[in-house]
């Protein structure tokens, strides 16, 4: 298939062509768009969806056919993404007049599924127009907006394959659906108050609240301090009035979530500016149709006016409304003004908006499930009768100050709703691999050709329901991509449920299963998204991943080359007193450091609040239940423990996050040179020991200054260590990965330092640097293993 | 001690030390084996064997000698059998103090006498210094299975109730405390004890077919055993953490060491999976028995294709009580 572009200079030449459009082209208003173009360009023929995307067969002047090709790419609808556009000549049919949209055709399914998008400006205009038939209708949508992925059972993307199949279109909606010029032409979730889903409000044990206006009633209850579970796009949220400390406190108590930060939903950017200092990137992210939670720089107003929402942290998670229902709550609060003017005025309502995932289990999606699983947490439930087919948590992102050109300065902390299931482009085509990720923040990855589909966030695989969700999503991914993997990949850890699920699937399918070392996978994920070929230095810094020697790695300097890696160096090991328990109690790590400093006798006095302090000192001295770890995360914990910043963690990463917050508040400091050691080890990268730095912190009375010194000196030490390895190995590209790179101070400082030394720095951008991106790296390594035949 | 190569010294050792301690008519015959009476009519024979390698050999609440008796007797008991006879095979290391050996053998004889299961035949080998770890003891037991009893790991059904006979983790923590020289405010003692009498009490209290599964949660502890039962039975389990008895000292030691008592070994505890309508009677019978005073109902068997054992935590959350493929490895990233 190639484009023949020769045209006759005098007579317009007529020809007929078949176009094949691949990418995200179904369910995004692509066919009406083609219809309009065909009308304008006086082309006759047809357009249809097929399993592979969209097919267009048109005839007209050769010039207009070329114009069509250009405009298909240049003017595609907002949610469309064209990956390939190919065409071939067909025989001209003089009898063909007019242009039609013909029925979908089955066939091999390779089209991309489109993601969920926030309600669009056109729909907002309609829903706030009192004369519109969809005035305040909570399920308004069009081909440019609304839920898709979370509604869809399978492909092709047709109403029958969505949870809208239960709602028969009324004549008005059917007319819109069938009119090629309408914004709702083939808008599969099209609906109106006549024919579409409806709201309901439940309380207590699922008893229906007799109200004609569930939205107004919900707002009233929120303003009275109740906690309401609100059905969203990929699951329920728990909401309460963030300005009501009593309500926030009750939510914390009921969710057993002592001080983990809550995200806030506010009406618009104008309102968001009251709570945070927003960069232009922040504003773009907040207003993007994906509507992620954006971690923004908190203003003092948050701690002054919203007590207990994001304690002891510099950032606050903000999110703008994304479903029409969210907008209705704010519209009610604004007094139901007609028009959309109010959307640009600040509103002081801030709602705590947290995933309804009791006890860290998967998000609640069903109505009956909500009243069962949220019993005792929610006071009421704002529900509707459109089923959520696919569970999908909110995404979390953050802008980063750019350190070099070409860096778009956005980092994923969780890649889920709005981004799933968009494909990440890989360097080349390869075998289909399903990778199962790690234990915490689990997400899967299935590759198809040169695309990698990272699943939505599945969560921590510590409950049976999370493990079931893993199985379901693995199956769903294979179904919607119509693909059975040729191999599976998993972590090296034998006891992760993800490892077991991978092994079980491999056995069932009779395909190989590859165990990929944790930090190798971290580095490979970054390589994959940057299309890097050839050897790379990998600096993988995180909590813990199982090493090839059975030890707990986590501060690793690797040389990675496709399927192979070599451990060039690592951080000096610290004992983990009480193994995994030490990962939750920074004081234990501080005690471990004191012991290494020869100051073990201080442990009992320094941590006298801990009953077990003197016993722990004995354990460490005897080396009992103290497996070594090279984890950087634990060095962070030790620093936080020594500085008295955090003794026990209420949520994962708390100590490091609070340390970062303090360091940011204190401001930049010069690193303490010479407060680290790199043990020489032949041609390898050597062991980096931070003990001298920690000795400094042990006697630092100012926690904030200590935190700043720790960050600055750590970055300098990592720079020196990495440079040494780069010089010894001759590899000048370094990939930074692992959960520690969520620390903005560290990642900005280090990446600036390395870049200024002439190294090419690759960072996680399309996927989170933490374990949420692990599956991409596992899949990448497994594809290398398959093709390199090792 | 130097009694190698089956020489006269060994023979003398056997006759003097073992025969005297275990003294019974079968052993006194001095033949190569024991001729035993047939079981009661309708009963079938059950045989079980266990090798005992424990470090340290002496620990609070027991030693390798009593453990070697209890281990095999309990294997028979959880098969539903009445234990009848034991054999014992000793592997001794050259140079091991005779006084200590005598303590072990005496404890073993005492254990065997108190459960009424004589050691009817035995063997002793001595290995060179450095090729053993003091004393290894392998015991084999024979028991009689009364008709109608058929407890098996595959018999748990959804709706059945899970009972335990007492506190979890005592043996594992007692061993660890000695091995790592950990001193606690009050000594943690192993629960090493025979279960045969408790099992008979149970069968006297409820119909035999109400007892679906009997297990002693030894190595890998309660968590591992429940997972084995779940997988064998093709079902899941829902366990209530707050209902599982754990001694406060064991709890505190686990807290310090970062261990989970549900993965620690027990040597005198019974897991019973029981038909729901007889669960109360079974529980009452166990509680009336001295070895089952702390018996508790800890959960139920549920239908679950994944065969997950789920724990409702004290905080109200749910967590997987997973099985481990080996030693617990650090996993928190
Ligand atoms: Fe990691
Ligand atoms: Mg055994
Ligand atoms: Zn729209
Ligand atoms: Zn309608």
Image (cartoon, helix red, strand yellow):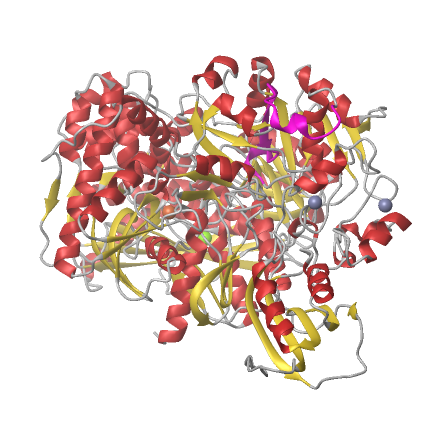
The vertical placement of A211 against B127, above or below, is above
- Is A351 magenta? The answer is yes
* Residue A74 on image: x %, y %: 56, 60
Q: Quadrant of the N terminus of chain A?
A: bottom right
- Is A315 magenta? The answer is no
Q: In the displayed structure, does residue B309 sit left or right of residue A516?
A: right
Camera-side residue of A157 and A693: A157
Q: Quadrant of the C terminus of chain A?
A: bottom left
Camera-side residue of A23 and A354: A23
The vertical placement of A306 against A380, above or below, is above
Asked whether residue B1 is in view, the answer is: no
The vertical placement of B153 against A8, above or below, is above
* Magenta residues (range): A337-361
* Residue A248 on image: x %, y %: 57, 19
Q: Quadrant of residue B261?
A: top left
* Residue B301 on image: x %, y %: 65, 44
Q: In the displayed structure, does residue A418 sit left or right of residue A608?
A: right
Residue at 56% x, 24% y: name it. A271
Asked whether residue B157 is in view, the answer is: yes
Camera-side residue of B225 and A710: A710
* Residue B98 on image: x %, y %: 20, 45
Q: In the displayed structure, does residue B188 sit left or right of residue A288?
A: left
Q: Quadrant of residue A359?
A: top right
């Amino acid at each position: 298939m190639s484009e023949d572009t020769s045209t006759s200079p005098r007579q317009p030449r007529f020809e007929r062509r078949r176009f094949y459009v691949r990418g995200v082209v179904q369910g995004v208003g692509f066919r009406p768009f083609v219809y309009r173009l065909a009308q304008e360009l006086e082309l006759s023929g047809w357009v249809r969806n097929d399993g592979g995307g969209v097919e267009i067969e048109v005839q007209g002047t050769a010039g207009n056919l070329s114009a069509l090709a250009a405009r298909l790419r240049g003017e595609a609808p907002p949610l469309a993404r064209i990956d390939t556009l190919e065409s071939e000549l067909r025989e001209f049919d003089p009898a063909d007049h007019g242009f039609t949209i013909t029925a979908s055709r089955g066939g091999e399914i390779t089209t991309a599924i489109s993601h969920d998008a926030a309600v669009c400006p056109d729909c907002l205009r309609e829903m706030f127009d009192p004369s519109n038939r969809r005035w305040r209708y909570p399920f308004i949508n069009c081909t440019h907006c609304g839920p898709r992925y979370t509604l869809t059972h399978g492909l092709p993307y047709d109403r029958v394959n969505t949870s809208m199949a239960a709602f028969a279109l009324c004549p008005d909606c059917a007319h819109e659906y069938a009119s090629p010029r309408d914004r709702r032409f083939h808008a599969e979730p099209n609906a109106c108050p006549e024919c579409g889903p409806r709201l309901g409000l439940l309380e207590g044990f699922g008893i229906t609240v007799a109200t004609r206006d569930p939205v107004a009633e919900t707002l009233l209850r929120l303003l009275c301090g109740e906690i309401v579970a609100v059905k969203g796009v990929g699951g329920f949220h728990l909401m309460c009035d963030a300005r009501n400390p009593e309500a926030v406190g009750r939510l914390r108590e009921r969710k057993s979530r002592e001080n983990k930060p809550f995200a806030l939903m506010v009406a618009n950017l104008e309102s968001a500016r009251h709570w945070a200092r927003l960069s232009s990137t922040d504003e773009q992210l907040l207003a993007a149709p994906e509507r992620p939670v954006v971690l923004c720089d908190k203003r003092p107003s948050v701690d002054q006016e919203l007590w207990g929402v994001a304690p002891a942290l510099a950032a606050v998670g903000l999110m703008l409304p994304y479903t029409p229902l969210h907008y209705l709550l704010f519209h009610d609060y604004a007094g139901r003004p007609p028009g959309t003017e109010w959307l640009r005025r600040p509103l002081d309502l801030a709602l705590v908006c947290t995933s309804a995932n009791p006890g860290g289990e998967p998000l609640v999606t069903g109505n009956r499930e909500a009243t069962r699983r949220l019993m005792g947490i929610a006071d009421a439930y704002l529900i509707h009768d459109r089923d959520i087919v696919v569970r999908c948590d909110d995404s979390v992102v953050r802008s980063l100050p750019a350190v070099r050109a070409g860096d778009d300065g956005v980092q994923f902390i969780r890649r889920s709703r709005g981004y799933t299931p968009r494909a990440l482009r890989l360097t080349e085509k390869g075998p289909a691999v399903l990778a199962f990720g790690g234990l915490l923040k689990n997400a899967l990855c299935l590759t198809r050709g040169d695309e990698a589909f990272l699943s939505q966030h599945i969560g921590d695989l510590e409950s049976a329901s999370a493990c079931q969700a893993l199985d379901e999503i693995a199956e769903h991914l294979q179904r919607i991509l119509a693909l059975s993997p040729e191999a599976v990949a998993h972590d090296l850890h034998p006891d992760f449920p993800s490892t077991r699920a991978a092994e079980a699937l491999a056995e069932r399918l009779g395909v190989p299963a590859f165990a990929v070392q944790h930090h190798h996978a971290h580095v490979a994920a970054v390589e994959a998204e940057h299309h890097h070929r050839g050897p790379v230095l990998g600096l993988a810094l995180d909590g813990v991943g199982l090493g090839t020697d059975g030890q707990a790695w986590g501060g690793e300097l690797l040389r990675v080359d496709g399927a192979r890696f070599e451990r060039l160096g690592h951080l000096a090991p610290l004992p983990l007193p009480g193994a995994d328990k030490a990962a939750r109690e920074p004081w234990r790590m501080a005690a471990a450091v004191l012991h290494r400093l020869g100051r073990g006798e201080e442990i009992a006095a320094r941590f006298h609040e801990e009953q077990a302090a003197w016993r722990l000192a004995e354990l460490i001295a005897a080396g009992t239940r103290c497996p070594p770890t090279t984890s950087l995360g634990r060095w962070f914990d030790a620093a936080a423990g020594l500085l008295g910043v955090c003794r026990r963690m209420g949520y994962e990463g708390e100590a490091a996050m609070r340390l970062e917050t303090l360091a940011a508040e204190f401001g930049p400091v010069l690193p303490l040179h010479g407060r680290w050691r790199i043990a020489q080890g032949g041609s390898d990268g050597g062991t980096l020991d931070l003990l001298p730095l920690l000795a400094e912190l042990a006697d630092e009375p100012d926690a904030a200054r200590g935190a700043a010194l720790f960050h600055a000196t750590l970055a300098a030490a990592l720079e020196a260590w990495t440079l040494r390895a780069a010089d010894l190995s001759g590899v000048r590209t370094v990939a930074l990965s692992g959960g520690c790179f969520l620390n903005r101070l560290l990642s900005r400082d280090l990446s600036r330092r390395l870049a200024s030394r002439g190294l090419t720095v690759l960072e996680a951008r399309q996927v989170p640097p933490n374990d949420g991106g692990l599956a991409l790296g596992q899949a990448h390594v497994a594809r290398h293993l398959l093709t390199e035949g090792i | 001690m130097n009694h190698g190569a089956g020489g006269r010294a060994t023979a003398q050792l056997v006759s003097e030390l073992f025969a005297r301690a275990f003294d019974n008519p079968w052993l006194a015959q001095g033949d190569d084996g024991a001729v035993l009476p047939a079981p009661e009519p309708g009963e079938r024979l059950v045989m079980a064997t266990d090798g005992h390698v424990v470090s340290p050999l002496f620990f609070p609440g027991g030693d390798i000698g009593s453990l070697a008796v209890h281990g095999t007797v309990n294997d028979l008991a959880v098969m539903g059998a009445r234990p009848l006879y034991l054999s014992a095979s000793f592997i001794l290391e050259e140079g091991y103090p005779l006084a200590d050996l005598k303590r072990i053998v005496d404890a073993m004889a005492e254990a065997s006498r108190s459960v009424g299961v004589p050691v009817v035949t035995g063997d002793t080998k001595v290995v060179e210094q450095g090729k053993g770890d003091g004393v290894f003891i392998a015991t084999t037991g024979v028991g009689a299975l009364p008709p109608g009893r058929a407890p098996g790991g595959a018999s748990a059904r959804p709706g059945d109730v899970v009972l335990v006979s007492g506190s979890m983790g005592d043996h594992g923590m007692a061993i660890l405390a000695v091995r790592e020289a950990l001193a606690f405010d009050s000594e943690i003692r192993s629960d090493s004890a025979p279960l045969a009498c408790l099992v008979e009490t149970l069968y006297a209290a409820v119909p035999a077919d109400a007892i679906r599964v009997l297990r002693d949660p030894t190595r890998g502890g309660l968590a591992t055993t429940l997972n084995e039962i779940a997988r064998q039975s093709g079902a899941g389990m829902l366990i209530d953490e707050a209902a599982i008895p754990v001694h406060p000292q064991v709890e505190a030691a686990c807290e310090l060491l970062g261990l989970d008592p549900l993965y620690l070994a027990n040597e005198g505890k019974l897991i019973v999976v029981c038909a729901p309508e007889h669960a109360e009677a079974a529980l009452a019978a166990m509680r009336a028995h001295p070895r089952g005073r702390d018996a508790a109902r800890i959960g139920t068997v549920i239908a679950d294709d994944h065969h997950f054992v789920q724990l409702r935590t004290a905080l109200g959350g749910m967590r997987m009580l997973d099985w481990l493929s080996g030693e617990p490895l650090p996993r928190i990233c």
